[in-house]
Amino acid sequence: MTEQLLRAQADVFRLPIPKTGEAVYFDEGKPRDRAPGLALRIRAAGSRKFVFFYRLGGRQLKYTIGDAGGWTLDKARVAARGLRVKVENGENPADERASRRADAALLFSAVARDYLEARKPAMKPRSHAECTRHVDKHWRPLHSMALASIDRAAVAARLRTIAKVSGAVAADRARSTLSAMFAWAIGEGLTEINPVNGTNKVSDNKPRERVLSDAELAAIWKAAPDSEYGRIVRLLMLTAQRREEIGSLSWSEVDREDALISLAGERTKNHRPHDVPLSSMALAVLDVVLEREGRALVFGNGQGGYSGWSASKEALDDAAKLAEPWTLHDLRRTAATRMADLGVAPHVIEAILNHVSGHKAGVAGIYNRSTYGAEKRAALELWAAHLQTVIAQADGANTKLRRATR
C-alpha cells in the first residue's frame, strides 16, 4: 500500500480525496526541505490547498496560502517559512491579510458599488442610472483609490476636467452624486470626511429657458434619422411629452383607432393618468414602426425602452448643426410656448403637458375634473400644422403660418 504522506510535488495530486469532510497532510519532506506547519488540505469536494498552521498567544491558528493548482510544494514551503518568521516576531499573518481585505473593501469602486445598491430602492430608475453613469464615467479615475485618500484637491481637479470635457452642468451634477455618496459613507462609518465640501460649483445650474426657433425646429426635424431615435424625436416635437414617456411607450398605450396615447399614473411624473391625442402627423410617425413579436414596447431592445440617448443625440447635433446647444426637453418647452403664440389657451396647454399648476391647482382642480380632450386634440393638430408649415418653408415652399382663433 502506498504511503499517504506529503513529501514531494508528486504527492500533491496523488494523495486521495476523503469521502467526507477534509484530510490534512503535513509536510513530511526531508529535514532540509520541509517547512514546519505547512500542510496540504484536501476536501471531499475536491479542493486541494496549502495551509500554514501556527500557534500565537496560546491559540492554534491557520493561514491559507493558496490553491495547489497555482502553488507548487516548493513555492508553498518558501511562503510557509516566511510566515514562520512573522509569527516568531509576534506578528499574526491573518491580521495582515484582514487588513489588506479591509483596505480593498474601502476602495472608492467598492464603496460606490455598495452605495448605488443601497440607494436603488429609494431612487427612480432614471435617477439611479444617472448616478451610476456619474460614478462609472466622471469619477472613474478615483475607482482604484482608497476612500480615505481622496481629498478636496483631488475632487476639485477632477471637477475642472469634467467641466472642460462635458460642460459645467455635467460637472455640477457629478459633484452632487459624489457628495451624496460620501455623506452615505460617513453614515455607514466608512469615512470621516466628505471631500466634496468646500469645492466650487462650476455653474449656477439655473432652470433652462431655451425655446427653439422655427428654423431650429425645421433643422431638427429634417436631421432626425430614419431610426427609432429619429421617430422618438419627432414624436416629442409633435406631442410635447417627456422623453421617458415616449422612449418607454408600449403598444398597449397606443390606440390607433382613436388616435390616442393613454399613459397610466405610474408612467407619469405626477402619477396622474394622462391621455395624449395624436395628430395625423404623429400617427404617420408611429405607422412606420413595426410591432415585434414578443416585444411589448414600441422602442428599444431588452427589458426596458429606448436607451441609446447620448450617442444618438450627439449624432443628431452633428447633423442639425444648431448654433446653440439644446436638449430634448427644450422641445417640450418650445411646443408649449409656440402653442401659446398660436392662440391655444393656457389651461389647454397645461392639460397637454399634464401639469397640475395654474388652472388645475388647488380648489379649482378639485372641482374641475375636465381633461379637455377635444381642446387638446385641436391644439395638437394646430401645432402639427405649424410644424408642417415651417418644415415646408425650410424646403423652400411659400406657405403662410396661421394662428388659432380664440
Image: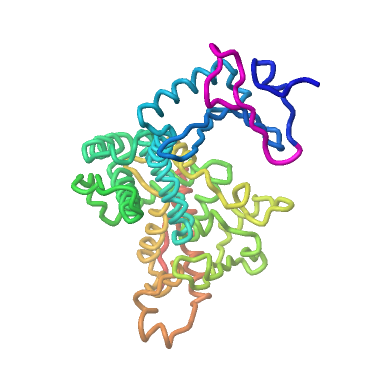
Residue 41 in the image: above or below residue 369? above
Colour mode of the rendering: rainbow
Left or right side of 355 for 2: right
Which of the two residues, 367 or 286, is positioned nearer the viewer here? 367
Residue 398 drawn at (x, y percent): 44, 49
Which of the two residues, 250 or 153, is positioned nearer the viewer here? 153
Can see residue 321? no
Residue 231 in the image: above or below residue 90? below
Whether residue 132 appears in magenta in the rendering, the answer is no
User: What secondary structure is the stretch in magenta mostly built from?
Assistant: loop
Q: Quadrant of the C terminus?
A: bottom left
Residue at 41 percent of width and 49 percent of height? 131
Q: Quadrant of the N terminus?
A: top right
Left or right side of 144 for 203: left
Whether residue 30 appears in magenta in the rendering, the answer is yes
Residue 178 drawn at (x, y percent): 33, 47
Residue 53 drawn at (x, y percent): 52, 31
Residue 269 drawn at (x, y percent): 45, 65
Residue at 38 percent of width and 60 percent of height? 338
**What span is in magenta?**
19-39
**Which residue sits furthest bottom?**
367
Quarter where residue 70 is shown = top right
Residue 331 in the image: above or below residue 219? below
